[in-house]
Image: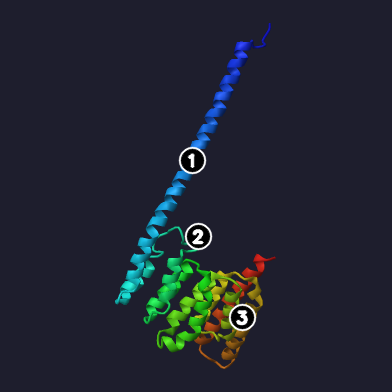
Amino acid sequence: MDVTPNLNEAGMVRYILSYKQQKIKIKGLLEITLKNFILVMTLMINLLLQPLLSTLHAEQAMSGNSIERKKALRKLTIKPGPYRGAEAEAPLWMTELLENALADPNPTVVAEAVDQIGNLKIRSLSSRLITLYNESDSKFRGYSERVQNSIIETIGKNKGAECSEFLSDLLEDDNGTPSGFTILRAIKNLNDAGLTAVLQDYAIRMETISLKLQEKGVDALIYSNFERHGALAREIADSLGGANE
């Protein structure tokens, strides 16, 4: 029995296959076109809204009420947006707004600005933050610790060689203070294996202080604080070393 399809059948098969292929191609093109349309519209809306948003935020940020100024800064990242946690840089108006807020006379407003710089990972302001850290004792008497701790945390988020050097110097100068924990957590976020040796030296120093205090019969509440500093430093050092083995 001859099972070879005749010309008409073969032509029909080719037509059906061709039709299905064309249908798949058209569907793919439509999907790509729709995605491109949505992307273009999103970009256009952002471009149109940015001047309005920047003006509104600037007006709030320059309010005579420090609470309103903090609210304006907090709104920059209060909801997940196109800039928070993204690789793309924050728009220029945001960077300028936050940089200006660093000169605010109210330390709580400054601390909020610093926190937002960290949330947005504006690395171009790292040098400015380090300078502000060194000036904060004289600028914000009685409130400098709040600003300094915010700077430490943000430097840990921003990363980079300058940030590593800054945190390394702070850790070398720390003697088991409450800020020491903030420095250690920032170094953990920084995730720079080059700081492993600094962490290990710090751990040894804290453990040595703890042992000396124990020998003197000091209360456990006091020497255990140094033990906790040392233990956290070793934990972070081990995690950094393990990440590069």
Between tags 1 and 2, which lies in front?
1
Q: Is residue 181 visible in this depiction of the protein? A: no
Q: Label 1 belongs to which residue?
A: 33
Q: Are marks 2 and 3 in contact (CB under 8 Å)?
A: no
Between tags 2 and 3, which lies in front?
2
Q: State the CA–CA distance, disc 1 to disc 2.
A: 25 Å
Residue 180 drawn at (x, y percent): 53, 81
Q: Is residue 180 above or below residue 189?
A: below
Which residue is situated farthest in the top direction here? 1
Q: Earlier in the sequence, mark 1 or mark 2?
A: 1
Residue 162 drawn at (x, y percent): 59, 76
Q: Mark 3 is on which residue type? A: Ala
Q: Residues within 10 Å of mark 2 (few under 14, many from 20)?
A: few
**Residue at point 32% right, 70% down?**
60
Q: Earlier in the sequence, mark 2 or mark 3?
A: 2
**Residue at point 62% right, 71% down?**
192
Q: Is residue 66 visible in this depiction of the protein? A: yes
Q: Decide which of 219, 162 is in the foreground and name it.
A: 162
Q: Is residue 13 above or below residue 234?
A: above
Q: Mark 2 is on which residue type? A: Ala
Q: State the CA–CA distance, disc 2 to disc 3.
A: 34 Å
Tell me the SS state at disc 2: loop
Give residue 5's quadrant in the image: top right
Q: Label 3 belongs to which residue?
A: 203
Q: Label 2 belongs to which residue?
A: 86
Tell me the SS state at disc 3: helix
